């Protein structure tokens, strides 16, 4: 039960927060630049399910064991929790930038996409880890 709670609640809270922020950004983008010509259907529903499933798998297989290791040792791979997740956000954000980079828009789009990926992952992991910490506090009472 505890592992299921730690898997579903932080993940869904983080994914829904990022989805909401991306919707807000999309509204501002559309108002400023007009609708994207290459977007033919609303991709939210197509993307939200696989992203959530992947996030749940990562949470169950990687995040919870790493979180438990941090609780015991305070260090994983020689890094404390903050530096560990900062590196994770930067590397993940750069990968995000490469995946969503529109090459025809130049290197500026790569930088912006990477920056947005870093920010999105920082928000996601902050929510996720704070939620895990609250769950641990709640379970120990």
Image (spheres, rainbow, N blue to C red):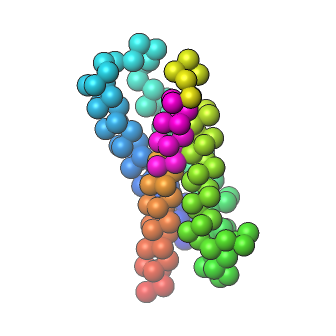
Residue lying at 62% horizontally and 58% vertically, measured from the top left: 87
Which residue reaches farthest right?
77
x, y percent for residue 118: 52, 48
Q: Nearer the viewer, residue 38 or 14?
A: 38
Q: Where, by quadrant of the figure, is residue 102 drawn?
A: top right
Residue 9 can be seen in this image: no
Q: Where, by quadrant of the figure, is residue 86 drawn?
A: bottom right
Instruction: Decide if residue 8 is on the left or right side of residue 23.
Output: right
Residue 31 can be seen in this image: yes
Q: Verify whether residue 111 appears in magenta.
A: yes
Residue 60 vertical position relative to residue 33 in the rendered view, above or below: below
Check the picture and name the quadrant holding the C terminus.
bottom left
Residue 59 vertical position relative to residue 83 in the rendered view, above or below: above
Residue lying at 67% horizontally and 76% vertically, measured from the top left: 75
Which residue reaches farthest bottom?
141
Residue lying at 67% horizontally and 60% vertically, measured from the top left: 62
Q: Nearer the viewer, residue 43 or 122?
A: 122
Q: Which residues are magenta?
A: 108-119
Instruction: Decide if residue 61 is on the left or right side of residue 140.
Output: right
């Amino acid at each position: 039960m505890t592992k299921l709670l730690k898997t579903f609640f932080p993940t869904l809270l983080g994914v829904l927060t990022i989805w909401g922020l991306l919707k807000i950004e999309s509204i501002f983008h559309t108002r400023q630049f007009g609708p994207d010509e290459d977007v033919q259907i609303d991709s939210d529903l197509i993307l939200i399910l696989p992203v959530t499933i992947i996030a749940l798998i990562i949470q169950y297989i990687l995040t919870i064991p790493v979180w438990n290791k941090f609780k015991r040792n305070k260090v994983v791979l020689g890094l404390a929790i903050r530096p560990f997740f900062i590196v994770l956000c930067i590397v993940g954000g750069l990968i995000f930038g490469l995946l969503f980079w529109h090459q025809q828009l130049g290197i500026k789009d790569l930088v912006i996409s990477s920056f947005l990926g870093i920010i999105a992952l920082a928000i996601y992991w902050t929510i996720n880890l704070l939620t895990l910490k609250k769950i641990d506090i709640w379970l120990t009472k």
